[in-house]
């Protein structure tokens, strides 16, 4: 009922506030000191790290999801990755460009504007894209889901790598051989499930080591 709706609104407000605090910082918040080393030699973030959820949105404009006024591939993966991150580190901050897009759209367009009428102005597109690319460079870790090629994600990964951020790519199928993935990823996973299991294992292992 209305109680559940109010509770969910409060949760979303807290998430937006956390993202705003992170993205309004004038300095980058991540550094090598925010990373640890897993038993397999891979780097992974310390507790309380910030994560940017990169991944295919528009792709080749063949998707069925039109919630932001563009043809998008299914965005279900975002919730799956977010749950995996928070399962391994409940104190993590999640920066989701899909939420950023919705927030920007609500500022640029009047309530009730049909999705197909959004993003007609190139200036609006440039503003939104610049915001998410900058966000990818400010977090501690970027996780990019790439079942297909994504030009936008490639720019996000380039920005994150230039800023020295940690990058994980989840690349089902042939995308593991993509040159952007091979050039920028610190570690590559074949599935969200594989990445989720690894992240939980290394965080739990680090916690046990600290306790010892």
Image: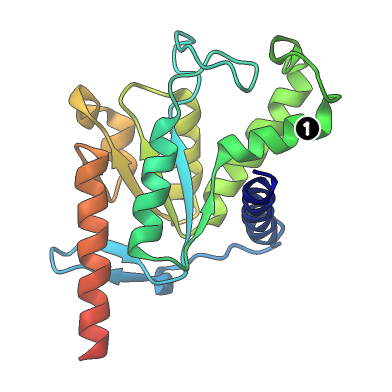
Q: Determine whether the residue tagged by mark 1 lies in a helix, strand or loop.
A: helix
Q: Is residue 212 left or right of residue 103?
A: left
**Residue at the spot of label 1:** 106
Left or right: 2 with respect to 212? right
Q: Position of residue 146 (x, y in %)?
A: 34, 30
Q: 122 or 100: nearer the eye?
A: 100
Q: Position of residue 12 (x, y in %)?
A: 64, 50
Seen from the viewer's position, the closer of residues 195 and 32 is 195
At x 33%, y 21%, the residue is 148
- State the quadrant of the N terminus: top right
Residue 35 is left or right of residue 6, and the answer is left
Indicate whether 72 appears above or below 35: above
What residue is shown at x 69% (from left), y 53% (from top)?
13
Q: Quadrant of residue 172?
A: top left
Q: Is residue 126 above or below residue 43?
A: above
Percent position (x, y) of residue 17?
69, 58
């Amino acid at each position: 009922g209305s109680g559940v709706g109010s509770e969910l609104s409060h949760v979303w407000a807290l998430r937006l506030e956390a993202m705003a605090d992170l993205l309004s910082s004038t300095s980058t918040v991540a550094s090598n000191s925010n990373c640890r080393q897993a038993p397999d030699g891979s780097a992974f973030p310390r507790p309380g790290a910030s994560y940017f959820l990169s991944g295919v949105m528009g792709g080749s404009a063949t998707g069925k999801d039109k919630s932001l006024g563009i043809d998008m591939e299914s965005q279900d993966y975002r919730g799956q990755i977010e749950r995996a991150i928070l399962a391994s580190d409940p104190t993590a901050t999640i920066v989701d460009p899909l939420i950023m897009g919705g927030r920007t759209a609500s500022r640029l367009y009047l309530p009730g504007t049909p999705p197909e009428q959004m993003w007609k102005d190139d200036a609006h597109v440039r503003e939104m894209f610049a915001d998410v690319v900058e966000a990818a460079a400010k977090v501690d870790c970027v996780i990019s889901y790439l079942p297909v090629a994504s030009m936008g994600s490639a720019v996000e990964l380039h920005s994150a790598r230039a800023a020295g951020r940690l990058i994980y790519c989840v690349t089902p199928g042939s995308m593991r051989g993509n040159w952007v993935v091979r050039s920028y990823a610190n570690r590559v996973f074949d599935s969200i499930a594989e990445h989720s299991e690894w992240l939980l294992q290394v965080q739990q292992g680090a916690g046990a080591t600290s306790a010892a």
